[in-house]
Image (spheres, rainbow, N blue to C red):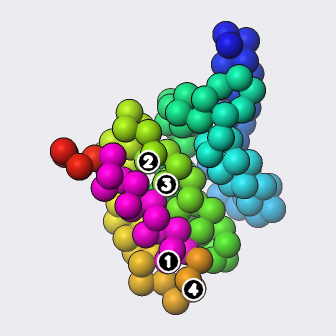
Amino acid sequence: AGRAAEVAAGALAALVGLLSRPSGGERQLLALRLLNTLASSDAGGLSADRIRMELVVQGAVPPLVALLSGKFAPESLALVANALGEIAKNKATSPSLLSLGAVSPLAALLASEDSLPLAQGAWALSWVACTNESR
């Protein structure tokens, strides 16, 4: 898993770079889709929890939080909320969502007129609450 971890770290760093671009467009949307897929299942010999940890180490949370504050299509907002929810599933990575300010923007999605970001925001917040219940 040593080499697989190196490859995964490089791929995740590239994805985080795409998320951080100010005008990401279609590439950013594709990066969000891939990030969601990787964070929700085992990939390349790595567990989903290991991938979630690597996403936090690579700095994925700040650009994801920033994307929640942008003017994006409902599908994109839902993908961002889903990615944060996937990261929150891991008790070791979930506290990063609290410390990096993800809760308020996720909660703001609950006021969305579109049901997709609203539902994904609620789902992500439920994971933050479940994995941080003693905080």
Q: Position of residue 134 (x, y in %)?
A: 18, 44
Label annotation for residue 118: 1
Name the residue tied to disc 3. 85
> Label 4 neighbourhood size at 10 Å, few (<14), some (14-19), many (20+)?
some
What range is drawn magenta here? Answer: 117-131
> Label 3 neighbourhood size at 10 Å, few (<14), some (14-19), many (20+)?
many
Q: Secondary structure at mark 4?
A: loop
Mark 2 near mark 4, Cβ–Cβ under 8 Å?
Answer: no
Residue that lies at the very extreme toward the left in this rendered image? 134
> In the image, is residue 133 part of the stretch drawn in magenta?
no
Disc on the earlier residue, 1 or 3: 3
Disc on the earlier residue, 1 or 2: 2
Kindly identify the amino acid type of the residue bearing the numbered disc 3: Gly
Residue that lies at the very extreme toward the top in this rendered image? 2
Residue 15 falls in which quadrant of the image?
top right
Instruction: Tell me: residue 95, above or below residue 76.
Output: above
Disc on the earlier residue, 3 or 4: 3
- Tell me the CA gap for discs 2 and 4: 23 Å
Kindly identify the amino acid type of the residue bearing the numbered disc 1: Leu
Name the residue tied to disc 4. 114
